[in-house]
Image (cartoon, grey):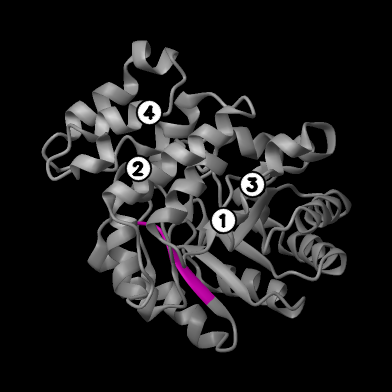
């Protein structure tokens, strides 16, 4: 998610879901070719496995950026063909690329030739109000012919005119059956379900019915759910408890502060960690209070944790 799943957010989410595959926010080719590459691509080794999601429509530029991603250590390069925002459309990429499957195939092939890590695609099921199965089948088919074998399908159409990005996540109907049909028609490809997944049981069912489930905003608003899902999908992998997560984020924030990262950016993804728990409001309030934030002292996480019912005394000393 643009301006959301930055490296601080991903580090925090990694603590909650040690075995999940993490994705960067969509980064445009222009931002990498003409901008600050370390700012966009730097990440912590603990984030692995982590995929770099790119936005662009020029094969040569995407190949160059895919190579940068591999050089920086990313485990996968993902091309976004699903974002419907006007900002993205003006750049002629995102969901509008689904109208040009031959161009997308050229982009995928150029990226594949540039890197040895997997190149994957995130897409919608159709454009505007055309719900023809042939459209998405042929789109997937052209990419499949290049050797692409991982498709992250947001199970809605993208309406390019008249709907906001928020409306595009809610108004076009979900069509999970279409993703099932794609999975049947391309049996040796992997299809990861995205869209409308809003509770732990639903996400777990999607992850086991398909070849995975991608979640975004629910992980931001209810991050504790990642821990619940992780414990169910990977029961043999230990997940840190509340006190361990807070302590590790204090350690991480201390390290990041020494490199100049603002404390507000580091702890922002943690605001919803205790939603539904006694003391959650005080936790959020303390971490949003300008006065303690102005100290730039990561110890405010310990101070805020003291409000949470059941917090271990030694964790807040």
Tell me the distance, in whole angstroms, between the alpha carbons under discs 4 and 3.
23 Å
Q: Main secondary structure of the magenta part?
A: strand
- What is the magenta range? 191-196
Residue 276 appearing in the image: yes
User: Local crowd at mark 1 within 10 Å, few (<14), some, or many (≥20)?
Assistant: few
Residue 19 drawn above or below residue 166: below
Residue placed at 58% from the left, 74% from the top?
137
Is 192 part of what is drawn in magenta? yes
Precedes in sequence: disc 1 or disc 4 = 1
The residue to which callout 2 is attached is 246
Residue placed at 19% from the left, 45% from the top?
312
Residue placed at 75% from the left, 35% from the top?
31
Tell me the distance, in whole angstroms, between the alpha carbons under discs 2 and 3.
20 Å
Answer yes or no: do the residues labelled 2 and 3 have beta carbons within 8 Å?
no
Near-viewer residue (203 or 39): 39
Disc nearest the viewer among 1 and 3: 1
Is 37 part of what is drawn in magenta? no
Tell me the distance, in whole angstroms, between the alpha carbons under discs 2 and 1.
16 Å
- Decide if residue 176 is on the left or right side of residue 147: left
Dot 4 lies on which element?
A: loop
The residue to which callout 3 is attached is 43
Near-viewer residue (188 or 249): 249
Precedes in sequence: disc 4 or disc 3 = 3
Residue placed at 59% from the left, 82% from the top?
189
The residue to which callout 4 is attached is 299
Dot 3 lies on which element?
A: loop
Disc nearest the viewer among 2 and 3: 2
Residue 253 drawn above or below residue 58: above
The residue to which callout 1 is attached is 46
Precedes in sequence: disc 2 or disc 1 = 1
Image location (x, y in percent) of residue 244: 34, 50
């Amino acid at each position: 998610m643009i301006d959301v799943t930055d490296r601080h957010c991903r580090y925090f989410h990694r603590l909650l879901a040690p075995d999940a595959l993490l994705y960067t926010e969509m980064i445009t080719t222009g931002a990498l070719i003409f901008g600050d590459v370390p700012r966009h691509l730097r990440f912590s080794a603990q984030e692995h496995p982590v995929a770099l999601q790119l936005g662009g429509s020029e094969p040569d530029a995407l190949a160059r950026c895919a190579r940068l991603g591999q050089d920086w250590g990313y485990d996968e390069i993902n091309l976004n063909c699903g974002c419907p925002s006007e900002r993205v459309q003006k750049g002629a990429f995102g969901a509008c690329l689904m109208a040009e499957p031959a161009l997308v195939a050229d982009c995928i092939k150029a990226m594949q030739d540039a890197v040895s890590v997997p190149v994957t695609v995130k897409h919608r099921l159709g454009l505007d109000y055309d719900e023809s199965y042939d459209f998405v089948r042929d789109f997937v088919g052209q990419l499949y012919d290049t050797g692409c074998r991982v498709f992250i399908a947001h199970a809605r159409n993208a309406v390019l005119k008249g709907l906001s990005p928020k409306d595009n996540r809610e108004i076009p109907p979900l069509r999970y059956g279409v993703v099932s049909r794609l999975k049947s028609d391309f049996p040796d490809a992997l299809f990861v379900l995205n869209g409308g997944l809003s509770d732990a049981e639903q996400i777990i069912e999607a992850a086991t019915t398909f070849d995975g489930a991608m979640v975004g905003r629910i992980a931001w608003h209810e991050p504790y759910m990642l821990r619940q899902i992780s414990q169910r999908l990977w029961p043999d992998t230990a997940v840190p408890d509340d006190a361990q997560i807070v302590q590790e984020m204090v350690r991480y924030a201390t390290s990041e502060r020494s490199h100049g990262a603002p404390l507000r950016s580091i702890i922002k993804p943690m605001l919803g960690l205790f939603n539904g728990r006694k003391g959650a409001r005080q936790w959020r309030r303390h971490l949003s209070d300008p006065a303690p934030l102005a100290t730039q002292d990561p110890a405010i996480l310990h101070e805020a944790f003291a409000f949470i019912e059941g917090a271990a005394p030694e964790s807040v000393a």
